[in-house]
Amino acid sequence: MSAMNRKLIQNLADTMCKQVKHFNTVEVECLIRLFNALLGEQTERKVGHGLDRLNFRHILHNTFDMTDDMMMDRVFRAFDKDNDSYISVKEWVEGLSLFLRGTLEEKIKYCFDVYDLNGDGYISREEMFHMLKDSLIRQPTEEDPDEGTIFNTKHFIIKYTCDCCYDHDGKVSYADFKSTVREENLLLEAFGNCLPHLKRIQSFEQQAFQEPQELH
């Protein structure tokens, strides 16, 4: 994708603003300019496709403080709607719309899709343990008592989910997940952090909408 001239960006922003929630035209234009700048950091061979997985993971890690490899991969897949292994400018803006400003209902659906590893419409017990395994294998120690908090929290999540969410097949459906999160919002990211914290959102928006040419 070659550098976009100002008129082209404005026209694209006008069009996308009618299709994307939560952003106004000026904000969409800023995100398009940022996207264009990020493309410049990729090799010429990949530029025509959009943001590649490596560059996108770099953004998730350095801008939004995400560290879990599995969750970053799942977030990439959530953005990459057409499954072509690249994030297009449209997918970039649409994904950020939910990522930064999505409603609770939108975030519930997003998180469920992230946690549904095999895409069968359910979160199985195996998928839960696969996502939580790094936390569950760490036992609390005297040297690091915080690990006890993590360990106990994860066990609470699994127990709560088992008690409240499982259908007759031993899996969590979207309806189950939605009703549980509505009852207790803290369980939205029960199986891994796949949304940015408020401070990171504020920092990103301040920089992107004022200095859209680069991310630090």
Image (cartoon, rainbow, N blue to C red):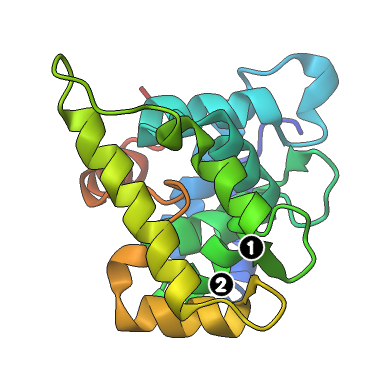
Q: Which mark is residue 132?
A: none
Expressed as whole percent of the image width and height from the top left, the position of residue 23 reads 43, 66
Task: Tell me if I can see residue 23 in this picture.
Answer: no
Label 2: which residue? 109
- 59 in relation to 205, above or below: above
Expressed as whole percent of the image width and height from the top left, the position of residue 100 reads 39, 57
Q: Which of 29 and 90 is in front in this view?
A: 90
- Asked whether, in this view, residue 53 is left or right of residue 202, the answer is right
Which three-letter amino acid code belongs to the residue tagged 1?
Answer: Asp
Q: Nearer the viewer, residue 63 or 182?
A: 182
Callout 2: SS = helix
Expressed as whole percent of the image width and height from the top left, the position of residue 89 reads 66, 48
At a point 29% along the width and 50% down the height, the residue shown is 153
- Image quadrant where one finds the C terminus: top left
At a point 40% along the width and 37% down the height, the residue shown is 212
- Image quadrant where one finds the N terminus: top right
Which three-letter amino acid code belongs to the residue tagged 2?
Answer: Lys
Q: Residue 113 carries which label?
A: 1
Task: Tell me if I can see residue 83 in this picture.
Answer: yes
- 59 in relation to 104, above or below: above
At a point 56% along the width and 72% down the height, the residue shown is 109
At a point 45% along the width and 69% down the height, the residue shown is 161
> Badge 1 local density, few (<14 within 10 Å), some, or many (20+)?
many
- Asked whether the beta carbons under mark 1 and mark 2 sit within 8 Å of each other, the answer is yes
Expressed as whole percent of the image width and height from the top left, the position of residue 33 reads 52, 40
